[in-house]
Structure formats: C-alpha cells, structure tokens
Image (cartoon, rainbow, N blue to C red):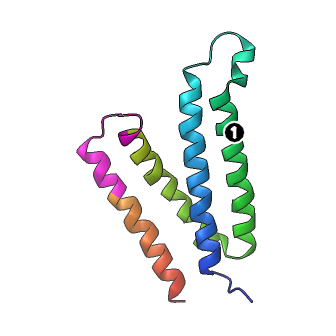
Amino acid sequence: MISKNSLFAILLIIGCTFLTSFGQYFIKLGTTYFTSNPLSILNFYLIVGCILYGLGAIVLIIALKYGELSVLYPFIALSFVWVFFMARFMLHEPILFINWIGLVIILLGVSFIGWGADHE
C-alpha cells in the first residue's frame, strides 16, 4: 500500500507542475497568433497549451488520491520555478536579481514542506 504522503504522489505533483508550466509556455506562444478573429483562439499553440493544462489537472487529481492536500499542494509552487526558467532561457525575458531571490525562497519553502512531510 502507498503511504499517505508517498514519493509517488510527490512525483505526480512535480509532473503536474511540468505539464501546467509547459501549458503556460505554449499559451504564451499562442498569444502571438491571437487576433480579433474569434477563430484565432483555435491556433495550434493555444490548443496544445490547454491540452497540457488539462493533463496537468488529471495528474493532480491522481496525486491527491495518494497524498495529503496540505503536503502536496505547496509543490504546485514549483510551477513558478519552471516558468521562471522557461521565460529566461526559452523566451529570453530579462530576470532581475530580486526575481532570483524570490526563486530561492520558493525552493526553500517547498523543501521545508517536503522535509516536514518526511518527519511526521
């Protein structure tokens, strides 16, 4: 039997954050093809982004079956980390030093929550 805060559930949550982050990336790409024409919402990138978001939601639902919401949900903050790096290295957006500090704080927070789950 899988424990309430299993590694399996945490890995699923991390997978969920990858899916939703790539969904955000594709939606961002799709906005360049979005016009006043209502059919432009059907562009490839927006559709892929929405599909990735939907898959992320399904993975989240499965993860929550195997773990506690209070432990698993804070891992969703990892989405900020993945989007941060995508924005910097794939979209070439400028990142300020203060943003790097925020990223470190997010990583520390997720680490503390994960550590606390292991030491109940």
On the rendered image, what quadrant is the N terminus found in? bottom right
Residue sitting at the far front: 44
Residue type for callout 1: Cys
> What range of the chain is rendered magenta?
88-103
Q: Residue at x 29, y 51 (%)?
A: 100
Residue 47 in the image, given as x and y percentages of width and height: 70, 33
Residue sitting at the far left: 97
Give the crowd class for mark 1: few <14, some 14-19, many >=20 residues within 10 Å: some
Relative to 67, residue 76 above or below: above
In the image, is residue 94 part of the stretch drawn in magenta?
yes
Residue sitting at the far top: 36
Q: Residue at x 71, y 42 (%)?
A: 51
Residue 78 in the image, given as x and y percentages of width and height: 49, 58
On the rendered image, what quadrant is the C terminus found in? bottom right
**Position of 20 compared to 37: left or right?**
left
**Position of 37 compared to 118: left or right?**
right
Kind of element beneath mark 1: helix
Q: Residue at x 54, y 29 (%)?
A: 29
Q: Splitting the image into 4 quarters, where does residue 57 fall?
A: bottom right
